[in-house]
Image: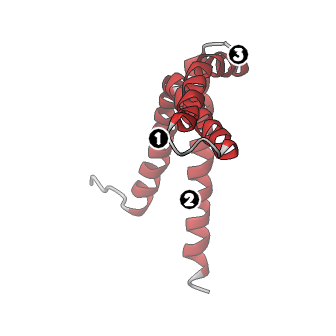
Amino acid sequence: MKTEQPFRSNLRYGRALVKSGVSGLSSGREAHLQGQPLSAVLAESARASLGLAALGACAGLLRYCLPGRRGRIAQTVACSVVGSAIGFVAGFAWKTRDLTESMAHSAMKQMNVVRDERWLDRHPIDYA
């Protein structure tokens, strides 16, 4: 029965960490967006990422221009799709980096509060 108490304590601590992290993500998102809808910001970032997606698709099509590789249309199209996906993801990550930073920073701040509370519970400071 003694092992059950630390397990429950750790479970409560884990839940508190997750709850504070999610709360921090939400507050960081709201702080960054300042009233704008998230869907509008993500749609704008996706539109701005289409240029890099097209560049990635072109890079995949360059495979067709190489000598000795002309007969493989399916592989060229696959390389083009992969290049396009990589370009889009890279562009989207770059365009949303400020939002991601704000959310991560806020989540870490709130999780650190929970961590500090747990540390103080386990290591009480006696000033007397």
Badge number at residue 108: 1
Compare residues 102 and 123 and report the one nearer the observer. Answer: 102
Q: Is residue 46 above or below residue 21?
A: above
The image position of residue 102, as x and y in percent, is 50, 27
- Mark pair 3, 1: CA separation: 26 Å
Question: Mark 2, residues whose alpha carbon is within 10 Å: few (<14), some, or many (≥20)?
Answer: some
Residue at mark 3: 40
The image position of residue 2, as x and y in percent, is 56, 84
Quarter where residue 44 is shown: top right
Badge number at residue 85: none
Residue sitting farthest toward the bottom: 1
Question: Mark 1, residues whose alpha carbon is within 10 Å: few (<14), some, or many (≥20)?
Answer: some
Compare residues 48 and 61 and report the one nearer the observer. Answer: 61
Residue at mark 2: 13
- Mark pair 1, 2: CA separation: 15 Å
x 40%, y 55%: residue:
120
The image position of residue 114, as x and y in percent, is 49, 48
Quarter where residue 60 is shown: top right
x 63%, y 41%: residue:
76
